[in-house]
Each structure stands twice: as C-alpha cells, then as structure tokens.
Amino acid sequence: MARRIDLVADLGEGFGDWKMGDDDALLDIVTSANIACGFHAGDPRIMDRTVAKCVERGVHVGAHPSFPDLVGFGRRAMDLTGDEVRTDVIYQLGALQAFATAHGTRVAHIAPHGRLGNLVAVREDYARAVVAAVLVVDPELRVLVQDGCLADAASEADLQIGVIGIADRAYEDDGTLVPRSEAGAVIHDEDEIAARTVRMVLDGTIESRTGRTLPVTVDSVLLHGDNAGAVRLAQRLRDELVAAGVEVAAPERRR
C-alpha cells in the first residue's frame, strides 16, 4: 500500500481588505486547510469565502485557533489561564463550525496557531484546555500535533491525532522547532526543503540543526503560503511526493 500523506496550509489569514498569501493557488495543491478563526487573522467574510472555496475543491476544513492577538498575528506569548484558553478555543471552533454548516460541510480538524501552537507542546494546562474544548464541541475532530503535551493529552482522551511535519523549519535535538527569533529557524533552500519533506514521509526521520537524526512519524506536511515563491515550492513538494509513490490525500474521517 502506498504511503498516504495529507498536505495542509494555513489559509484565510487576511483581515478586511488586507490579504496574505495566494489562497486560491494553494487550494489547488493542498488536501486540508487550517483556517484562521478571527483571533490572529481572518474575519467573518474571509472565513465564509475560504470555507466555500474549500468545499468547491474538496479540501478538508480545519480550525486554526490562536491567542486573541490580532496585532501580533498570534505569535506573542500571553498570560492566559487554562480556562481562558479553553473558552477562546470553543469560541473560535464554534465560529468556524457555523460557516462549515452553512456550506454543507463540517470542521475536520483543529491545529492551534502561532504561540499557542508552540505552548500546547510544553504546557500541560494549555494542552488540556484545547482537548477539553474539542471534547465539548466535537470529539470527532482530528487534533494536529507535534510531540509534546497536546499529543499526550489528546491521546489520553482518545481523540484522533495527526502528527505534523514542517519541512522548512529547523528542529532542535529534542524534536521541538527552533524558535523563529533565532538564526536558521526557517529554511529557505528549496532543494533542502524538498529533500527533507520526502525523507520525513518515506524514511520517518529528519535532521536536527546539530546534525542529529531524529525519528518522526508524519501524517500531515505543513506547507507555508505566506512568503515569496511559496506556491511554487508547495507544488514542487506535492510533485516530488507523488513521484516517490506517496498518495497525497486528506485522512478519512471517523464518520
């Protein structure tokens, strides 16, 4: 059986008349979308249009909740309690779920954004808050994770998880991402990114920034669409995976 991989990108990350990335082009490449839910980007009109376009192309709709940090694009740490994280995630999930219902589909997964996405890997209270939100809104949601607290909490709650691989980000020796504030955190060489992607998917390994070989089990590959040449690179990654015998498709839903 061919190895199956989900290609996912962060979409709907504009606000009002301001636009980020070429969502239309990426929707012809990806199989799933993380859609901004209004707290770091996105607004009701953008959410509505993005969900509609996902439905047109058969792309799975996913929620991309964040800290309430519109000015900082969700990338700043905020001193929220676990209960604030839980209710903020419920709020954002509910908003996207309403648009999904309006367009005859459902939210398939959740992937915390930015600083929240980093902290749920290392803060048990935040991880359990996200899991609690999923359990009360829709326990059939797939939770996209990296190794850490969220993966553990979601597994303990018997939620479906999908492990994300990020080929254009450098990894530490412990499997966490190198912070964006540090030099070399983002990889720009397209040949290197393509090679890392195929290696992650087929061999189940990735090289840390110190050269250590790390084991990874990847279900989804995150494609970034907010930089120059992003669409070209995303298409190349899909083409190389297909050429390597990988089936590119969103995971089947539980129901």
Image (cartoon, rainbow, N blue to C red):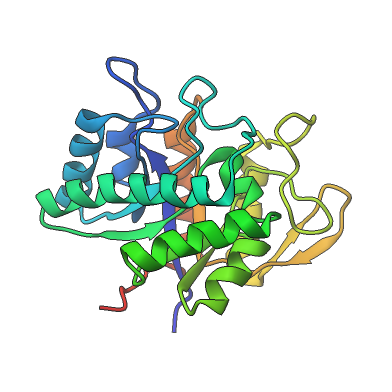
Q: Is residue 57 visible?
A: yes
Extreme residue toward the top, this view? 17
Please tell me which residue lies in front, 33 or 30: 33
Q: Position of residue 109 (x, y in %)?
A: 38, 60
Q: Residue at x 40, y 63 (%)?
A: 134
Query: How many callouts does the rendering have?
Result: 0
Image point 37% across, 51% down: which residue? 90
* Above or below: residue 126 compared with residue 74: below
Asked if 69 appears above or below 153 in the picture, the reply is: above
Front one among 148 and 207 = 148
Q: Could you tell me which residue is drawn at 50 percent across and 67 percent down? A: 162
Quarter of the image containing the C terminus?
Answer: bottom left
In the rendered structure, the answer to whether residue 182 lies left or right of residue 155 reads: right
Is residue 235 visible in the rendered structure shown here?
Answer: no
Instruction: Check the image and report above or below for 46 versus 177.
Output: above
Q: Position of residue 9 (x, y in %)?
A: 42, 45
Left or right for 43, reference 209 = left
Q: For this view, does 178 lie left or right of residue 163?
A: right
Percent position (x, y) of residue 155?
55, 76
43, 189: nearer the viewer: 43
Q: Residue furthest bottom?
A: 1
Quadrant of the frame with the N terminus = bottom left
Q: Residue at x 57, y 78 (%)?
A: 156
Residue 163 x/y as whole percent: 55, 65
